[in-house]
């Protein structure tokens, strides 16, 4: 319970009230719920007719059509299904970075993931969690019980940032593991080769998952505020560099801008929600703004 309270800020949860995370695309779940399903059955909303086949249940015959055509047709309906939310959390070493008084990128990502997990379980849907760096380290299968949140948070809380990242390998691996279609929420600084990242994301879309990329970055990585001679510590196998920041600020900012534009464009091209978030942003504002804009697109 103590860990849950640490991750689930009451102000953040209050800002999410009434904002259901509904799938924009077709999703697939384990039990009946509130989201459109790829399957047809005999429940909820009428979808189409199909011709009667001997052995079909005559309770679903459309007798009005029969009276006009003298042919037997069955009414088919769209089932509804619960949402499956897969949380994918990057725990590579670079996610442990923090500048000034900001929390680390990993900690911020954990806050966002916990809030989404809480919200989805509150709406009686299912959530799972995968922790990864250059491979999938831990995987918690989706479940819908309220108690599942405690296990999810414990797993995040006991997984420090370490090792190198290899997003492409991880995404291809998980795309093959996830047999049920759902919404995949990725929390990462995306420090990897962009074409390979997009290829991995494309695999999720090929499997007809909906994907949301929460791009978590520290403000210092974006603004490059360093002025004095600085020793930059290498992460994920990179060497240390002692340099004068003013000599490379312009080149760095041009490089980071080009990188961000490439990631955003790559996501947009394959219909993936790209959500850039700085770790100095109020979490409740960042999350509720995205969910509200998402809900507006569904109307």
Image (cartoon, grey):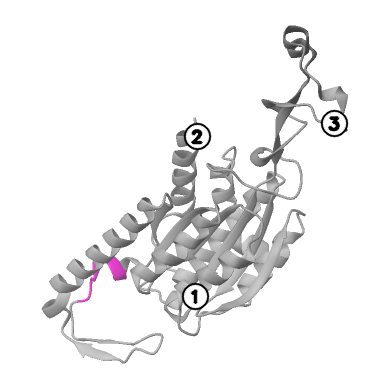
Q: Residue at x 56, y 60 (%)?
A: 113
| Tag in front: 3 or 1 | 3
Marks 3/1 in contact by CB < 8 Å: the verdict is no
Label 3: element kind? loop
Residue 223 position, x and y percent, is 25, 66
Furthest residue toward top: 68
| Tag in front: 3 or 2 | 3
Furthest residue toward left: 247
- Identify residue for label 2: 298
- Identify residue for label 1: 169
User: Which residue is more in the foreground, 18 or 101?
Assistant: 18
Label 1: element kind? helix
Q: Can residue 155 be seen at all in this image of the molecule?
A: yes
Residue 95 position, x and y percent, is 45, 74
User: Which residue is more in the foreground, 194 or 130?
Assistant: 194
Q: CA distance from mark 2 to mark 1?
A: 32 Å
Q: Is residue 69 above or below residue 129?
A: above
Q: Residue at x 60, y 51 (%)?
A: 10
Dot placed on the residue nearer the N-terminal end, 3 or 2: 3
Residue 162 position, x and y percent, is 50, 83
Q: Residue at x 78, y 19 (%)?
A: 72
Q: Is residue 203 above or below residue 166?
A: above
Label 2 crowd bin: few (<14), some (14–19), many (20+), radius 10 Å: few
Dot placed on the residue nearer the N-terminal end, 3 or 1: 3
| Tag in front: 2 or 1 | 1
Dot placed on the residue nearer the N-terminal end, 2 or 1: 1
Q: Which residues are magenta?
A: 220-226
Is residue 267 found inside the magenta-colored segment of the image? no
- Identify residue for label 3: 56
Residue 253, located in which quarter of the rendered image?
Answer: bottom left
Label 1 crowd bin: few (<14), some (14–19), many (20+), radius 10 Å: some
Label 3 crowd bin: few (<14), some (14–19), many (20+), radius 10 Å: few
């Amino acid at each position: 319970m103590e860990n849950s309270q640490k991750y689930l800020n009451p102000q953040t949860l209050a800002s999410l009230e009434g904002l259901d995370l509904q799938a924009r695309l077709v999703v697939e779940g384990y039990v009946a719920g509130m989201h459109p399903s790829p399957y047809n059955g005999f429940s909820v909303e009428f979808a189409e007719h199909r011709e009667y086949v001997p052995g079909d249940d005559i309770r679903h015959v459309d007798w009005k059509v029969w009276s006009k055509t003298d042919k037997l047709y069955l009414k088919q309906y769209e089932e509804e299904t619960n949402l499956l939310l897969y949380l994918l959390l990057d725990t590579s070493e670079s996610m442990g970075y923090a500048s000034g008084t900001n929390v680390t990128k990993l900690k911020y990502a954990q806050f966002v993931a916990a809030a989404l997990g809480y919200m989805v379980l509150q709406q009686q849907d299912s959530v799972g969690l995968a922790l990864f760096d250059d491979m999938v380290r831990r995987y918690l299968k989706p479940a819908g019980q309220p108690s599942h949140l405690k296990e999810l948070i414990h797993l995040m809380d006991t997984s420090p940032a370490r090792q190198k990242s290899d997003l492409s390998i991880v995404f291809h691996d998980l795309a093959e593991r996830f047999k049920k279609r759902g919404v995949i929420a990725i929390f990462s600084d995306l420090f990897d080769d962009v074409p390979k990242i997009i290829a991995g994301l494309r695999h999720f879309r090929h499997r007809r998952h909906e994907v949301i990329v929460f791009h978590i970055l520290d403000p210092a990585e974006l603004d490059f505020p360093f002025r004095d001679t600085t020793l930059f510590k290498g992460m994920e196998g990179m060497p240390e560099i002692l340099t004068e920041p003013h000599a490379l600020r312009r080149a760095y900012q041009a490089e980071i801008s080009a990188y961000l534009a490439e990631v955003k464009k790559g996501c947009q091209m394959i219909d993936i929600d790209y959500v850039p978030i700085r770790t100095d942003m109020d979490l409740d504002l960042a999350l509720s703004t995205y969910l509200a804009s998402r809900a507006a697109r569904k109307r």
